[in-house]
Amino acid sequence: MTEAVEITTFRLAEGLTMADFIAANADVAAWLREQPGFISRRICERDDGYVVDVLLWKSAAAGRRAAAGIMTELAGSPVHAAIDQASVDWTISAVRATSGGGS
């Protein structure tokens, strides 16, 4: 099975900070750890203020299943209100090559 990288970029809802967003993710972080095929997640902030949310999955199918689940199983999560929904760009791509070593 080919690993996949999920990359979502977005702006935070007006008036919120990165610390607010990370706090709003507590239930998401716990939920992700329970998802089949989940490997890791990194939340980054670009110089232009956009958030880059990067997840590594054991397969693209696992990532797509979880993406659908976050909108249903976690519909009440505070994370949704922390995101400027109009700014969201989401992709999931199969990994075709890797290099590097440890974390």
Image (cartoon, helix red, strand yellow):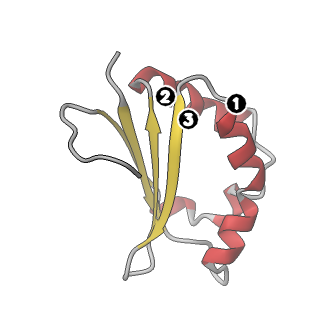
x 27%, y 33%: residue: 95
Counting residues from the N terminus, which is met first, the one under dot 1 or under dot 2? 1
The image's mark for residue 67 is 3
- Label 1 and label 3: CA atoms lie apart by 13 Å
- Label 1 and label 2: CA atoms lie apart by 15 Å
Counting residues from the N terminus, which is met first, the one under dot 1 or under dot 3? 1
Callout 2 secondary element:
helix
Say above or below: 83 vs 18. Answer: above
x, y (%) of residue 74? 75, 40
Total residue callouts: 3
Residue under pointer 1: 34
Which image quadrant is residue 47 in?
bottom left
Circle 3/circle 2 CB separation < 8 Å = yes
Identify which amino acid the numbered label 2 is placed on.
Answer: Arg
Q: Nearer the viewer, mark 1 or mark 2?
A: 1
Identify which amino acid the numbered label 3 is placed on.
Answer: Ala
Q: Residues within 10 Å of mark 1 (few under 14, many from 20)?
A: few
Say above or below: 16 vs 42. Answer: below
x 35%, y 15%: residue: 1
Residue under pointer 2: 64
User: Is any part of residue 101 visible from this angle?
Assistant: yes
x 32%, y 22%: residue: 2
The image's mark for residue 5 is none
Q: Residues within 10 Å of mark 2 (few under 14, many from 20)?
A: some
Residue positioned most to the front: 102
x, y (%) of residue 67? 56, 35
